[in-house]
Amino acid sequence: MRKLTTVFLAILTCITLVSCGLGTSGGFTQSGRLAGDVSDIDLSGMDVSVGSKNYTEQIILGKIAIVLLQSAGAEVHDLTNIPGSTSVRQAELEGDVDFSFDYTGTAWVTYLGKTDPIPDEQRQYEAVRDADAENGLVWLPPAKMNNTYTLAVKSSVAEKYDLSTLEDISKLPDKERTYCVEAEFNARSDGFEPMLAAYDLPSPDSDARFIVDTGAIYAATADGTCTLGEVFTTDGRIPALDLVPLSDPRQFFPKYNMAPVVNDELLEQYPQLRQLLKPIIDDLDNERMQNLNRQVDVDGKDYSDVAFDYLQDLGIVKR
């Protein structure tokens, strides 16, 4: 009976892993030929598993990596769309995922358990890079894009009250100072109330604070349900709904710069990965990522098509 129980649990674990998403985004991802500055790179013989988390931006980034690596001649296993940051992290630590794009703030706070984010982007990256080296993971230099929290307003509101930063919220009349936030952000120690305190803003009354599902905040801000809405700075709905994200001059929010994370043995065997990924890292900023996310979330395009078109527009992949 004990043996049967052990076998049953092993089978159940396998089923759970499959259902939880290791490879749930798989399927066909087109590839082409390398072009431009990376045209001479050849990764024939490389066998690599690419992972991502299970939301739009991460799947797009994962597909970008898959298209690029396949076009360079690598044998690529698609493990994009894994549920949750910690699941991707565990897969990397166990060697099931060789490559992903991740965020410096997530690594520092969630993976490495540090309580105090580092305000300077470069120093935050270097701290993560150095700390994770002992785990067999190499963090290559990050992109300019920083997928962090902020508050956003309609462009008409930004123009009317001359709003461009979180400091400018103080310019709003009291009756216009209404907020849409998700429950988690409302309760976080680095969320809504601490942010207000950091910017010397009063806590709103209950009738000026709307707790809204994450996906509904953007529309609620755009239709005037609230003046200020919590957003992620690279979300495609920001340009689609004509919202203006407010900058964070007091550097309250952690920095979430995106960077390639590579198994150190793989990078040692294929150092040309650095050159292959450099055009993407040099290019991706918040505006560019917003546009890619918008193509999926608003325009309904396929992740793989968005990834291929992006690399083709960048001039490093051709059909």
Image (cartoon, rainbow, N blue to C red):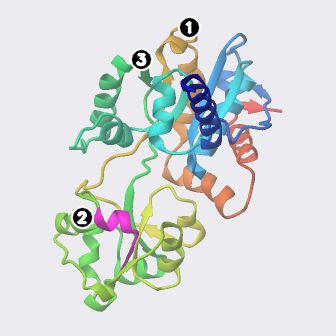
Distance from the alpha carbon under mark 2 to that under mark 3: 35 Å
Q: Check disc 3: other Cα within 10 Å, few if <14, some if 14-19, many if 20+.
A: few
Disc 2 target residue: 195
Q: Name the residue: 54% across, 25% down.
A: 2
| Three-letter amino acid code of the residue under disc 3 | Gly
Query: Looking at the picture, how far across and down is residue 109, in whole percent?
Result: 30, 41
Labelled pair 1, 3 in contact (Cβ < 8 Å): no
Labelled pair 2, 3 in contact (Cβ < 8 Å): no
Distance from the alpha carbon under mark 1 to that under mark 3: 14 Å
Image height of 295 relative to 17, above or below = below
Query: Looking at the picture, how far across and down is residue 261, in whole percent?
Result: 48, 28
Query: Looking at the picture, how far across and down is residue 6, in whole percent?
Result: 56, 26
| Three-letter amino acid code of the residue under disc 2 | Met
Q: Earlier in the sequence, mark 1 or mark 3?
A: 3
Q: Which residues are magenta?
A: 179-187
Q: Is residue 315 left or right of residue 126?
A: right
Query: Looking at the picture, how far across and down is residue 301, in whole percent?
Result: 74, 55
Element class at badge 2: helix
Residue reaching furthest bottom?
175
Labelled pair 2, 1 in contact (Cβ < 8 Å): no
Disc 1 target residue: 269
The N terminus sits in image quarter: top right
Asked if residue 181 is among those painted magenta in the image, a careful observer would answer yes
Q: Toward which corner of the image does residue 175 lie, by quadrant?
A: bottom left
Q: Earlier in the sequence, mark 2 or mark 1?
A: 2
Q: Is residue 242 left or right of residue 202?
A: right
